[in-house]
Every structure is written in C-alpha cells, then in structure tokens.
Amino acid sequence: MSSEQVIGRVQHWVREVVVGHNFCPFAAPSLDDTHYQVLSADAEQRLHELVACCLRLRQQPQIETALLIVPEGLDDFDCYLDQLALAEDLLSAQGFDGEFQLASFHPDYCFAGVEPEAAENYTNRSPYPIFHLLREASLSQALGSVTAPEKIPERNRRYAEQLGVGKLQASLKQSQELD
C-alpha cells in the first residue's frame, strides 16, 4: 500500500471519527494545518524521523500538529507502547520538553484497567499506529478555551458507550479498508 493510501485512510478516520464524533474538540480547527507522515518500519529510523518532524514544526509554525503513521512494525500494542515511551524519552533528551508532546493512537488501543473490547477504547483506536505530535503552547491555549476540559475523557467514554462497539468497529473498519 502506498503512503498516499495510508495517509488517505488516516485523514478519513480523523474527519469521520475524531472530528465526526467530536472525540477531540480541538481537531476540527486544525484539520488544514495538520502534517501527515508515514514513518519507517525500522524502530531506530522512526525515532530519527520523529526528531526531524519536531525540527520541521519548529521551523514551520503554520503546521499546527503532525500525525506520524506507522503502517508496518508496530502491530502489537505493547510493542507500540514501548516505542512510545522511547519516543517520549527521546523528545525530552533532545530538548523538546515544554514545546511538543505525544498523544497515542493504535488499532488495538486499550486504556489501563479497561476490558479490551470496551467502547471507550475506540476513542483512541485508529487505522494504524499513530504518534500524534502536539505543540504544547497550542494545547494549553485550546484547553484554556474550553469549560471543564478535564471532563472531556468522561464525556467521550459515555458517548462511545452510547454509540456502541458495533458502530465504532464499523467506523474504524471503514477507514482501514478505504482505497
């Protein structure tokens, strides 16, 4: 599958699931300012690409956020979490603390202490493993513009339960099979 097809699937998922279900109330305004990039299957190379993307965002402030997609090499959720921890450590070691942070999405995402097939996991399930690179200043500004941002996860959990696992699975599958 080409990088363009992978990116197309993720863009569809962002529009239809993330924005469509309002799982992230901050996503819609930055849709046109989002950088999408397919990362290498090689773990070490992925980390280099992550740092390069941070430098790119630093040089190009018009890019609000970046979705770094890993279609190969991180199918296992636990391996993905290990890579996420390495990526967070690398960002810190490279001096990006306070500037960028990572959010995480994976096809098998499972919140700690939650049953794997619980509807709430679908708020972070994506067509492919994704590292979402966020500007901390923008995130702080967005959180400051929302009343009770700490209630967003609970609202998402309740909404996901109302939608039901079947509908959420179908939405995710549609993005995964899009051509």
Image: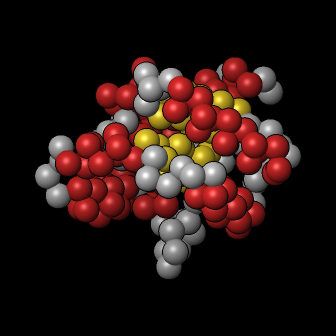
Colour mode? secondary structure
Q: Tell me residue 156's x, y (percent).
A: 33, 56
Please identify the quadrant where the N terminus is shown. top right
Which residue corresponds to the image point at 23% horizontal and 61% vertical from the top-left?
Answer: 151
Which residue corresponds to the image point at 34% horizontal and 30% vertical from the top-left?
Answer: 28
Judge whether 161 appears above or below 141 on screen: below
- Residue 163 visible somewhere in the drawing: yes
Q: Tell me residue 154's x, y (percent).
A: 29, 64
Which residue corresponds to the image point at 81% horizontal and 51% vertical from the top-left?
Answer: 43
Q: How many marks?
A: 0
Judge whether 146 appears above or below 49 on screen: below
Viewer-nearest residue: 163 or 94: 94
Residue lying furthest front:
95
Viewer-nearest residue: 173 or 154: 154
Q: Quadrant of residue 22?
A: top left
Q: Is residue 149 left or right of residue 74?
A: left
Judge whether 44 appears above or below 39 on screen: below
Residue lying furthest right:
42
Q: Is residue 6 left or right of residue 41?
A: left
Residue lying furthest bottom:
113
Viewer-nearest residue: 171 or 12: 12
- Residue 170 visible somewhere in the drawing: no
Q: Tell me residue 34's x, y (percent).
A: 48, 27
Which residue corresponds to the image point at 69% horizontal and 20% vertical from the top-left?
Answer: 4
Please identify the quadrant where the C terminus is shown. top right
Q: Is residue 161 left or right of residue 100?
A: left
